[in-house]
Amino acid sequence: MNNILELKARFDQKGNVGGGSRTLPEKCSVTAAHLKDLCGNLKKIEKYWQSDDFLNGALISIYYDRVIAKSNRTHFLLKGKGQLSPNVSIVGAKFIKSENKTKHVITHYLTNEIIGISVHFLEEAIKIIENNYNGAINKIKLEEIRRSSKFNYFEDFAKTNFINLIVDSCYIEKFDIDETSVKNVSNVTLVTLYKTDFTIKSLMAKLGINDYFQIGSIDETTVLLNPTQYEILMRKAPYLVAMATSDLRDIKFESATNQKYSQFSIPEPKNEPIIGVIDTLFDDTVYFSKWVEYTDLVPKEIEKKPSDKDHGTMVSSIIVDGPALNPDLDDECGRFRVKHFGVVAGKSYSSFTVIRAIKDIVEKNQDVKVWNLSLGSSEEVAENFISPEAAVLDELQTKYDITFVIAGTNKTKANQTRIGAPADSINGIVVNSVTIEKKSASYTRKGPVLSFYTKPDLSYYGGEKGEEIAVYSYEKLFKTGTSFAAPWISRKLAYLIQVIGFPREIAKALLIDSAAGWDHDDSEIDSVGYGVVPVKISDILRSKDDEIRFLMTGTKELYDTYNYSIPVPVYKEKHPFIARATLCYYPKCFRNQGVDYTATELQIQFGRMNDKGKIKPIDDDYQSTEGFAVTEEEARKDYRKWDNIKHIGEFLDGKKPKKAYNSHLWGISIKSKERLEENYGKGMKFGIVVTLKELNGKNRINDFIQACQMKSILVRPITIQTQVDIYNKIQEEIELE
């Protein structure tokens, strides 16, 4: 077996030179009639907001004719004087299905003055098209306008603005005012409002909801309302509601099969790493209780039963002593200490209360880097927005150097399909269950999230009928469920971060890479994720003799972060390897952006450097290359655009050695895109894990190390025992005389 190699190589950075001029697609012709329709939409909306003085501004939704790329969103329409881009006024985004096609609906908050400006320029454009272009402009005519020096039909209408208006209009079907489909609610509901000039406090005051502070808010746009308060909101300002979901979350706990009581023993805890657990209550009489620091956060006025301790205790039993209870699943990670926080009693919980508790727990326990969350809602997640719980988890993971490992939730009825909150967390590692044969367990629920983001991320053994997982509560029990798959991944992640010393981006990428292997099947990604993680930690931290696995870390500052000097070994003027690469990062996320949830996109290219100094990607991803055309929908489907995990690779079957170009070098390029104007990705860390497989079964790791050293790339082999010794040494207490 070969050790993993850490490469200390500098990434260079360069900015984006900018794209070409905007133009129309070949088959698009913008007619005066279409502009009249759009102008009519805007006049109607302008009149509506002039008669409604509740807000200082106007909410307006653009219905696009496709899944729209940022570059094709409106550039001129809905742009105010001095405003950098209409992009700054976006407050929401969703998908709709129309004519068997997925389409974007993007909502803006702006002034009525801006609507009036757009109406003015549409009217001017209509005159230009009717008087000079026979009522329609296609790509050829638009290019003639671009080249012409005589475009001076109206003094206040610059040629560039006219071109942008025409291109904008090509992709826009209509303008409208959206209202939520959730008209009535029967219980307390978490309501997310579109972001406006008003705070939640002032909005509630304008609505006359005077007892608002008896309820409360989660963030600047999400408030908890009872049915009466929600009815007031819907009567007075229904257009404010971006999304609404029930606050009450039902939990279904699997029944257990018990084993005849037997006495267990465990040594005293020492300097073992710590994992945080947020779950139901904990039974502090169990044999491993000294390994658990327990805090009960359930309000005293809530009735607590002995059974309320079972689920949380069983989850912690796997983290502390899972291998002793399940010798066949011994992961070689040893035991872990636990900080256990009980936040739920009974079979349901308030999402609002748990969210607040989680924020408080994490902020007060920043020494904990891995958190296990095996609680999940029985309800399916919504199609067009992230759950409030997941949004808070994503916010915490961006703000702090932590990772949540989250159970993928179980089916509670036969026709249930989509996963439940908070398993829609994008930054978290969501874990589903498989059988011993690595097939999806019978209770498995599926992704994706927001119709696109891959969830679950990984799978592990959570038990099935006849092959249950052994856990411990009041006695040894046998259980099934994603709740008991997630803690095994928490153990591995904590070991990689705390014992081996990897940053979380690399630790996550290693789990993904080891699970995907060389036979990753995308057809099962919605239920299994990228695959089943190996049982032994050594199978993650080492590679086979005919494989070279190396890792690199970097920080995104400019558009392109790259290294073109990776010396993959050559034999008989060919590279006798296939390759795979995994990129992980933790982007800032915005729930009020709806389906456009992640703010930053990182695209990875990895492959040989050709004789023109360009990367020849192993997955043929040329989406950022000049002259390569791909739609936004294709980029998301084929290249996982906007997803925060990128796994690219080749299959073993039929592969032959690759041509070695003159330099014999391979390269990595990480290109970034920002959805919002604030450039939230600047300074964001990323981790890359690359695995090379020698096609002839030869071990060429020493050749690779030597070649790296000749390129002044520092190579550090990661030896498990060495890292364990370093960890133990650091944990020693020094007594001063």
Image (tube, grey):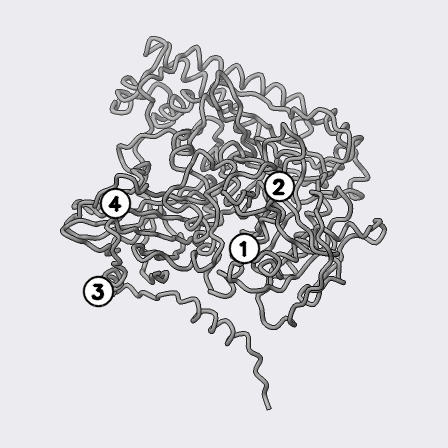
Judge depth for marks 1 and 4 and give the one in front: 1
Q: Amino acid at mark 4?
A: Ile
Q: Which of the marked residues, 2 or 3, is nearer the chain's N terminus?
A: 2
Q: Amino acid at mark 2?
A: Lys
User: In the depicted view, which residue is nearer to us: 19 or 454?
Assistant: 454
Pointer 3 residue: 710
Distance between the Cα atoms at labels 1 and 3? Answer: 42 Å
Q: What crowding class fits label 1: few (fewer than 14 Cα within 10 Å), some (14-19), or many (20 or more)?
A: some
Q: Which of the marked residues, 4 or 2, is nearer the chain's N terminus?
A: 2
Pointer 2 residue: 465
Q: Which of the marked residues, 1 or 3, is nearer the chain's N terminus?
A: 1
Judge depth for marks 1 and 2 and give the one in front: 2
Is 100 placed left or right of 247 in the picture? left
Q: Secondary structure at mark 3?
A: helix
User: In the depicted view, which residue is nearer to us: 85 or 565?
Assistant: 565
Q: Amino acid at mark 1?
A: Leu
User: In the depicted view, which residue is nearer to us: 61 or 79?
Assistant: 61
Q: Write the residue at 67% across / 57% down.
A: 361
Distance between the Cα atoms at labels 3 and 4? Answer: 21 Å
Residue 391 in view: no
